[in-house]
Image: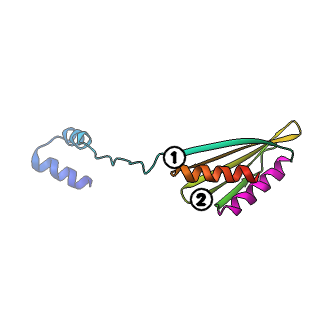
Amino acid sequence: MFLVLVYGIVNYGETFSSVVINYFASPVEVPELTKTYTPHLWSDFKVLEIDAELCAMKGKNILESLSFKTINRNLKYDKAKYVYGKFNDNRASITCAKLDGKTFVYTSVAGPDVALVKKLRNEIVWKL
């Protein structure tokens, strides 16, 4: 590349600085990102009379029963346990947090189809 640059400078009488300036001044085409959809987010919460870890296990079982894939549990935090998974283009999370001897559960589902997102959120909350 350097040799081609030197050859062009010698044969066409351009200065090195003008070649560099022209190279970097040329417009660069940036591909435009297009949104495939605007995600919809539905959420709900409950207070349960069970332990947060048991709540997280129950959440994992609920996501499995609804055919969610790639289900992960994050149990490393002392105060809250997280479960999340994917269902096609949808994502769901269940957060179980200790609250005065009870468990506060926050559920959210996001995805492109508002009817399906609402249905998945309702199924998860009803099964808790």
Q: Residue 24 sits in which quadrant?
A: top left
Q: Is residue 83 visible?
A: no
Please give left or right for residue 126 compared with residue 43 in the image: right
Q: Circle 2 sits in a helix, a strand or a loop, which is it?
A: strand
Q: Residue 106 sits in which quadrant?
A: top right
Picture coordinates of residue 14, whole percent (x, y): 14, 42
Give neighbour class at mark 1: few <14, some 14-19, many 20+ (Cα, 10 Å). Answer: some
Please give left or right for residue 57 compared with residue 20 in the image: right
Q: Amino acid at mark 2?
A: Phe
Residue at image position (73%, 58%) is 62
Q: Which residues are magenta?
A: 51-67
Magenta-drawn stretch, dominant element (helix, strand or loop): helix
Residue 55 included in the magenta stretch of the image: yes
How far separated are the C-alphas under marks 2 and 1? 14 Å
Q: Residue 73 sits in which quadrant?
A: bottom right
Q: Circle 1 sits in a helix, a strand or a loop, which is it?
A: loop
> Which disc, if any, is residue 87?
2
| Residue in the foreground of this view, choosing between 88 and 118 | 118
Labels 2 and 1: the sequence-earlier one: 1
The residue carrying mark 1 is 39
> Which disc, if any, is residue 63?
none
Residue sitting farthest toward the top: 100
Report the colour scheme. rainbow
